[in-house]
Amino acid sequence: MFSNVEEKLNSMRIVKAFSREQYEMERFEEINNKHFKFWRKSRIYHAFNVPLSEMLGVVTGVVVLMIGGIQVLDPNINFSFGNFIAFMLAIFSMQHPLKAITNAYAEIRKALVSVERISEILNRESEITESSSQIEMKTFEKSIEYKNVCFSYNGSEEVLTNINLTIKKGEKIALVGSSGSGKTTMVNLLERMYDTTSGAILIDNRNIKDIKLQDLRTLMGTVTQESILFSNTISNNIGYGALKELTQKEIIKAAKIAYADEFIDSLPEKYETPLYTRASNLSGGQKQRLCIARAIVGDPPILIFDEATSALDTEAELKVQKAIEQATKSRTVIVIAHRLSTILSSNKIIVLEKGKIVGMGKHEELLKSCERYEELYNLQFK
Ligand SMILES: Nc1ncnc2c1ncn2[C@@H]1O[C@H](COP(=O)(O)OP(=O)(O)OP(=O)(O)O)[C@@H](O)[C@H]1O
Ligand SMILES: [Mg+2]
């Protein structure tokens, strides 16, 4: 049936991919149905809740009126009209708190479901393991080294191949390459978001796997490709960048370096202004400047900057550029560069292509020696 082995293997891969897709679809359908059934049940209960409780109120009223009325009118029972009114008021004033208890119970049930889902994420085991013998590292003195680093997300497809790179303290490195070439992956490995498949990354001649995770991450401030900000105050969003308590003075200092103070000061509640979900009450440039402030607030010696590709207008871009210049002063910097100005101001440019380093050097040198860089320059930066 199959003319050669490769054809057979290909058809097996297609069948495997198809059955995986089918499995995912079935799982999605199952969860969807389950969710729909719960939702329908909850709407039915909700729809019954109001008329039922109103009706119960009316029935209670009628029963109380009847029994009370009979007792008041019966001359053999010592139950005055005043007593009856007091009893009625007591019964009706109980109704409201009872309804509140029912509502609170429903809210508690809802919260319990959320707690279950949140704890599922919080209790998930990290893939990055930390042994008790890991060493402390509070300062960065000499260099960062990538030694024959290979990495794959899924165990089969290599995303980075034989990366060798040395970054000396104080250097500014620009990583360039087409989309999917492995730039973000390279910096993710340095922060130990993932562990290398083979090879090692060393900081001051120490394998990062031997350094305490908290110390390693305190050495670095990161601005990610997408601005991730929380629905909280501006002050808390900046302060979140340091793994320690910060004073308001330190937060303002970081905002000033990142050129964020000028727009924060014009907001009604300044540093206490709450951000909406996805910080939708800020512009793209303002979000980026907040993220820069957050990255430098703990004063880390290494700054990693994954420049956003989203287009900013010239004025916003200029401000972000100024913020980057200020923030990167006297730090070791790795920038995934999308702006020509960032590339020109760096000490060394690394050209990545399909997970491999295909060029390394200064702008003018690379333009002459690296074809891929010339292509990228003409396409992206010129
Ligand atoms: N979490 C992940 N799981 C599996 N594959 C991933 C994951 N993140 C990235 N990849 C894959 O790894 C390769 C490199 O991705 P990476 O994000 O490092 O590229 P990049 O150079 O930063 O691209 P861009 O300029 O678009 O940000 C891509 O082929 C991508 O599909
Ligand atoms: Mg990226």
Image (cartoon, helix red, strand yellow):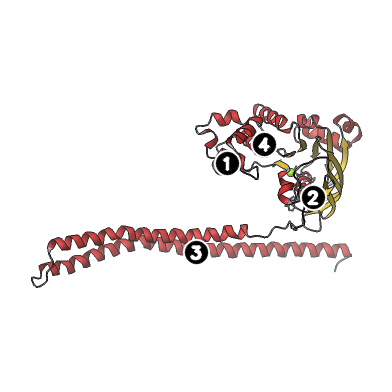
Q: Amino acid at mark 3?
A: Phe
Q: Which SS class for mark 3?
A: helix
Inspect the image, locate mark 2, and give the three-letter code of the amino acid beneath it: Ile
Q: Which residue is mark 3?
A: 38
Mark 2 and mark 4: Cα distance apart in space: 24 Å
Residue 285 appears in the rendering: no
Instruction: Find the distance from the CA under tag 4 to the CA under tag 1.
Output: 14 Å
Residue 263, given in percent of the width and then of the height, sits at 58, 30
First reached walking from the N terminus: tag 2 or tag 3? 3
In the rendered view, tell whether residue 174 sits above or below residue 47.
Answer: above
Q: Mark 2 = which residue?
A: 208
- Answer with mark 4 or mark 1, whichever residue precedes in sequence: 1
Question: For this view, does 315 lie left or right of residue 147?
Answer: left
Residue drawn at (12%, 64%) of the image: 80
Q: Are the two marked residues, 2 and 1, in contact with CB atoms closer than 8 angstroms?
A: no
Between label 4 and label 3, give the one nearer the viewer. Answer: 4
Query: Of the numbered discs in the image, which one, if any, rests on residue 292?
Result: 4
Image location (x, y in percent) of residue 43:
44, 61
What residue is disc 1 on?
236
Pinpoint residue 115: horizontal percent, then vertical percent. Answer: 54, 59
Q: CA distance from mark 2 to mark 1?
A: 29 Å
Residue ranking furthest to the bottom: 76
Query: Which residue occupies the extreme right position in the image?
Result: 369
